[in-house]
C-alpha cells in the first residue's frame, strides 16, 4: 500500500527481544538476570521470515529501497553488554 502511494524508501524494523520486557519476565519466571526464552525464540523466528519478506519486496520492487533494521540484535547487545554503554 505504501508503495502504491509513492513511497520508495522504506525501513522495516524487526521485533526486539520481547522476552526481556518486565511483563514477560514476570509471566515466564526465567532465572534471575535472564530473559524469557520462548518469547525471544518466537521473535527470532518471526524476524527470519520478516527478513525474507524484505528481500522478496526488494527483488519485486526494484525501484524502491527497503532497509531491514535489526533492532533485536542491537537491543540484545545493550542488554548483554550494558556496561559498555
Image: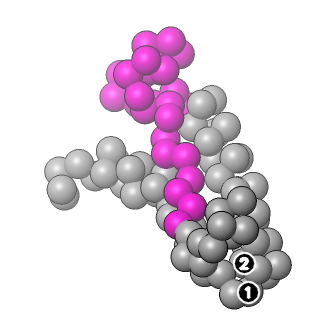
Identify the disc placed on residue 58.
2
Q: Residues within 10 Å of mark 1 (few under 14, many from 20)?
A: few
Tag 1 residue: 62
Foreground residue among 37 and 39: 39
Q: Residues within 10 Å of mark 2 (few under 14, many from 20)?
A: some
Task: Residue lying at the far front in this picture: please name it.
Answer: 5
Q: The residue tagged with tag 1: helix, strand or loop?
A: loop
Q: Judge left or right: residue 30 versus residue 49.
A: left
* Label 1 with label 2: CB-CB less than 8 Å: yes
Foreground residue among 35 and 57: 57
Q: Magenta stretch: residue 27 in it?
A: yes
Q: What are the residue bounds of the magenta stretch?
A: 11-37
Residue 73 pos. (x, y %): 46, 57
Residue at coordinates 79% horizontally, 72% vertically from top-left? 56
Quadrant holding the C terminus: bottom left
Task: Residue lying at the far bottom in this picture: please name it.
Answer: 63
Q: How is the image coloured?
A: one colour
Foreground residue among 52 and 39: 52
Foreground residue among 35 and 72: 72
Q: The residue tagged with tag 2: helix, strand or loop?
A: helix
Quadrant holding the N terminus: bottom right
Residue at coordinates 75% horizontally, 71% vertically from top-left? 57
In this view, 65 is above or below 38: below
Residue at coordinates 69% horizontally, 87% vertically from top-left? 63
In this view, 39 is above or below 3: above
Q: Magenta stretch: residue 72 in it?
A: no
Amino acid at each position: 500500500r505504501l508503495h502504491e502511494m509513492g513511497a520508495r524508501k522504506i525501513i522495516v524494523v524487526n521485533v526486539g527481544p520481547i522476552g526481556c520486557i518486565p511483563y514477560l519476565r514476570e509471566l515466564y519466571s526465567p532465572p534471575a538476570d535472564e530473559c524469557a526464552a520462548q518469547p525471544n525464540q518466537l521473535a527470532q523466528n518471526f524476524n527470519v521470515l520478516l527478513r525474507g519478506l524484505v528481500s522478496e519486496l526488494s527483488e519485486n520492487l526494484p525501484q524502491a529501497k527497503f532497509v531491514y533494521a535489526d533492532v533485536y540484535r542491537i537491543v540484545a547487545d545493550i542488554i548483554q553488554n550494558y556496561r559498555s554503554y
